[in-house]
């Protein structure tokens, strides 16, 4: 069952003991939640793994869908009429050295290789150049969808929608909200330490998850 954003905001309100949402307005907590989801994806791109079929543009340079944050893999050819063969990753420097003019070769519906640079995470290159009929199946990390903001003075019951992340990240996002909330009041005794403790819990949870996945 998808975890609702309202349930996370409610837990934050109760933990902060701000049931009237005066010190920490609900809209502010919702923005912290949205920031927290993006922070999780920054450290754990696999938290928002998505697979789709991309219709290529003519040429070698291809782009992720508009909600794409980072490419994970190009799997296979999927266009009607293609051989449906697997696509393998190669080192672009090797291809550049062996076939310097590979970007201007005749286009094909069947892609053999893809190249990817983490410094340009929304773009990948294909060899041979694609025709406009080429399609490939890819796996990528998507941006989470923001929870809609609420009107000033709203209670947590006004928060609608589910978080984009899997339910197992609910506590992680809650810790991030608490970290941001206590940081706002860090000048009060104990709140700086509380903020640090919640961020440590946030970071540790992601670290433990990384070790478990490995």
Image (cartoon, rainbow, N blue to C red):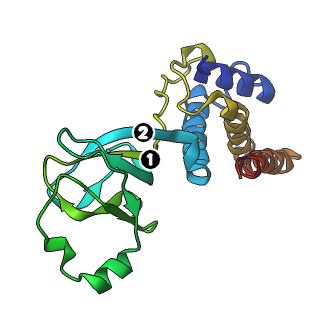
Image coordinates for residue 8, horizontal then vertical, percent = 67, 25
Compared to 97, does 27 lie above or below? above
Task: Say if 103 sits above or below 70 in the image.
Answer: below
39 sits left or right of 12 in the view: left
Residue sitting at 61 percent across and 29 percent down?
25
- Residue 14 occupies which quadrant of the picture? top right
How many marks can you see? 2
Is 25 left, or right, of 161 in this rendering? right
Q: Quadrant of the N terminus?
A: top right
Which residue is the site of mark 1? Answer: 140
Residue displayed at 26% across by 57% down: 111
Q: How far from the left and from the top, in percent, is residue 168? A: 69, 31
Q: Is residue 187 visible?
A: no
Dot 2 and dot 1 residues touching (CB under 8 Å):
yes
Residue situated in front as seen by the camera: 94 or 190: 94
Report which quarter residue 87 is drawn in. Answer: bottom left
**Whole-percent x and y of residue 157?**
60, 13
Q: Name the side, left or right, on which 4 lies relative to 172.
A: left
């Amino acid at each position: 069952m998808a975890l609702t954003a309202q349930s996370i905001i409610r837990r934050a309100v109760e933990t902060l003991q701000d049931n009237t949402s005066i010190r920490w307005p609900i809209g502010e907590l919702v923005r912290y939640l949205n920031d927290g989801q993006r922070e999780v994806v920054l450290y754990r791109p696999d938290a928002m793994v998505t697979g789709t079929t991309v219709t290529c543009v003519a040429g070698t340079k291809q782009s992720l869908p508009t909600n794409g944050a980072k490419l994970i893999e190009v799997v296979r050819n999927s266009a009607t009429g293609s051989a449906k063969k697997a696509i393998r990753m190669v080192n672009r420097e090797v291809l550049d050295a062996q076939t310097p003019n590979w970007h201007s070769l005749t286009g094909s519906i069947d892609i053999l290789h893809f190249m990817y640079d983490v410094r340009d995470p929304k773009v990948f290159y294909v060899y041979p150049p694609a025709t406009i009929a080429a399609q490939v199946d890819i796996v990528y990390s998507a941006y989470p969808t923001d929870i809609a903001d609420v009107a000033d003075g709203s209670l947590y019951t006004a928060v609608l929608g589910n978080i984009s992340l899997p339910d197992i990240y609910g506590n992680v996002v809650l810790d991030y909200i608490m970290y941001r909330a206590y940081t706002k009041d860090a000048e009060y005794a104990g709140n700086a330490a509380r903020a640090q403790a919640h961020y440590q819990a946030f970071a540790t949870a992601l670290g433990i998850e990384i070790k478990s996945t490995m």
